[in-house]
């Protein structure tokens, strides 16, 4: 149990997917202008990354590795993730219209989010088993949500500020991300 | 300047993928801790890009329009797997330095973006030149970012000591925050001299304009906001 909590804390805070590993930067910069939208995207990312890690881990352990086709993992994972997002969307639409309404418009954005593929590949690289992969996926999704919601909060404040012209738009967002990244470096000293 | 050399100029200067188009930010931020990594990442991406543009341009009349994105993804993923295996076998130091970011070339927006924006509409020769131009532009920008971070952060350049040892290097530049700061610096300079980067649009529109796929889902997303009932059908077309 302690190991699993450690995996969640590590992937959510210490190795934060956006601020430390730079995965999913596009949506991190693009969808972070409103807190509500970024929370919605965060929810969708948690959902998809957790399911994708589980499926990718099962596929790797029971299909690719026994057949000696581990080198095919990149192709298989990206196709599985693309199909999975599609299935999740159809399933949600049918079974849970409320959840679909909340997450639905963000789901297509996630297929090309490199965080999903990145986590699936990292899990394999770290030799995680099924349970560990699911928790690592969950932790990564939580880390992504924390980062994007915090950035959206910061952006809602700096929107009103009178900035020098060259700093407006992307640069100030990147600088805010840099400061957040410095703050998150503090988690590296967390001791267990 | 004929139309072939124009593609090179376009890729390196006019539409530089990192500095102007702001595509492929994940590897740019992640691996530019050293100038050397920039060369490794730039050349591997360029190899994949040239071959994917070549193949997609050759197949542009064969691949049905409805399934083009899955087809492109399979082509790119196969090429990336080949590249990864070659690097692992012949250049182990590069493989160790770039790690997970080699397989992640698959989701590099530059590659799908060029396939969607250029290779599926143009002749083989032009597509290959476009890929070479974009590849050089990407590599040059990576080396530039890598050089700044390496010189400021560890006082070396391509592993050689360039700053006097008495100057304490600012280690923050080789750590994750430095990546954001250096890219912010690039955009500030470009903004100050009046070059409109796509990043401004990207950030201000509040839309994931990362690559061809996302741009399309973006349009659908706006539709979806207008009339929620039509969203699912629209998304289905877009999805790979």
Image: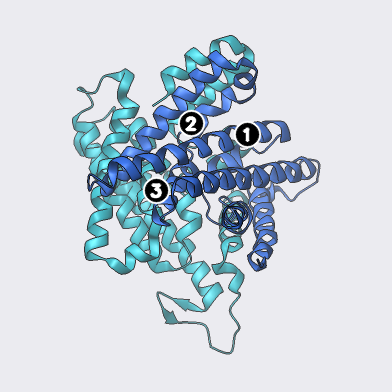
**Above or below B208: residue A172:** below
Q: Are marks 2 and 3 on the same chain?
A: yes
Nearer the viewer's eye, disc 3 or disc 1?
A: 1
**Above or below B150: residue A4:** above
Looking at the rendered structure, the secondary structure element under dot 3 is helix
Q: Residue at x 35, y 33 (%)?
A: A79
Residue on which the image places disc 1: A43
Residue on which the image places disc 2: B214
Looking at the rendered structure, the secondary structure element under dot 2 is helix
Q: Marks 3 and 1, how far apart in space?
A: 23 Å
Location of residue A57 in the rendering, given as x and y in whole percent from the top left corner: 41, 43
Residue on which the image places disc 3: B104
Q: Are marks 1 and 2 on the same chain?
A: no
Q: Nearer the viewer, residue B108 or A184?
A: A184
Q: Nearer the viewer, residue B94 or A192?
A: A192
Q: Chain of mark 2?
A: B
Q: Residues within 10 Å of mark 3 (few under 14, many from 20)?
A: many
Q: Chain of mark 3?
A: B
Instruction: In the displayed orientation, state which residue is furthest to the bottom.
Output: B166
Chain B is which colour?
cyan
Side of B179 relative to A146 (left or right): left
**Mark with earlier residue (2, 3):** 3
Nearer the viewer's eye, disc 2 or disc 3?
A: 3
């Amino acid at each position: 149990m302690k190991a699993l909590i450690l995996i969640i804390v590590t992937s959510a805070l210490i190795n934060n997917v956006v601020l430390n590993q730079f995965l999913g930067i596009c949506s991190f910069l693009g969808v972070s202008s409103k807190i509500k939208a970024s929370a919605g995207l965060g929810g969708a990312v948690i959902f998809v990354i957790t399911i994708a890690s589980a499926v990718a881990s099962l596929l790797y352990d029971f299909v690719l590795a026994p057949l000696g086709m581990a080198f095919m993992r990149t192709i298989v994972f990206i196709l599985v993730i693309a199909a999975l997002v599609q299935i999740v969307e159809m399933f949600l639409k049918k079974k849970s219209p409320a959840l679909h309404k909340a997450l639905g418009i963000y789901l297509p954005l996630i297929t090309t989010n490199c965080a999903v593929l990145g986590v699936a590949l990292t899990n394999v690289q770290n030799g995680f088993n099924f349970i560990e992969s699911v928790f690592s996926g969950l932790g990564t999704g939580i880390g992504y949500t924390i980062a994007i919601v915090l950035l959206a909060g910061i952006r809602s404040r700096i929107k009103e500020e009178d900035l020098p012209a060259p700093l407006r738009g992307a640069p100030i967002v990147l600088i805010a991300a840099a400061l957040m990244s410095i703050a998150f470096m503090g988690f590296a000293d967390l001791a267990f | 300047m004929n139309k072939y050399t124009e593609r090179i100029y376009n890729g390196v200067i006019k539409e530089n993928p990192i500095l102007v188009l702001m595509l492929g930010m994940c590897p740019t931020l992640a691996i530019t801790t050293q100038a050397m990594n920039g060369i490794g990442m730039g050349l591997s991406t360029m190899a994949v890009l040239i071959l994917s543009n070549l193949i997609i341009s050759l197949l542009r009349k064969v691949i049905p329009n409805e399934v083009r994105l899955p087809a492109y993804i399979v082509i790119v993923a196969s090429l990336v797997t080949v590249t990864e295996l070659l690097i692992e076998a012949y250049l182990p130091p590069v493989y160790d330095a770039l790690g997970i970011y080699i397989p992640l070339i698959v989701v590099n927006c530059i590659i799908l973006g060029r396939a969607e924006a250029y290779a599926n509409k143009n002749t083989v020769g032009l597509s290959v030149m476009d890929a070479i131009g974009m590849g050089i532009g990407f590599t040059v920008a990576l080396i530039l970012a890598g050089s700044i971070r390496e010189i400021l952060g560890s006082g070396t350049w391509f592993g050689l000591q360039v700053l006097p040892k008495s100057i304490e290097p600012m280690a923050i530049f080789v750590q994750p925050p430095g990546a954001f700061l250096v890219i912010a610096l690039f955009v500030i300079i470009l903004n100050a001299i009046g070059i409109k980067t796509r990043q401004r649009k990207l950030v201000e529109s509040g839309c994931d304009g990362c690559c061809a796929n996302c741009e399309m889902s973006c349009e659908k997303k706006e539709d979806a906001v207008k009339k929620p009932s039509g969203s699912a059908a629209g998304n289905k077309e877009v999805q790979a």
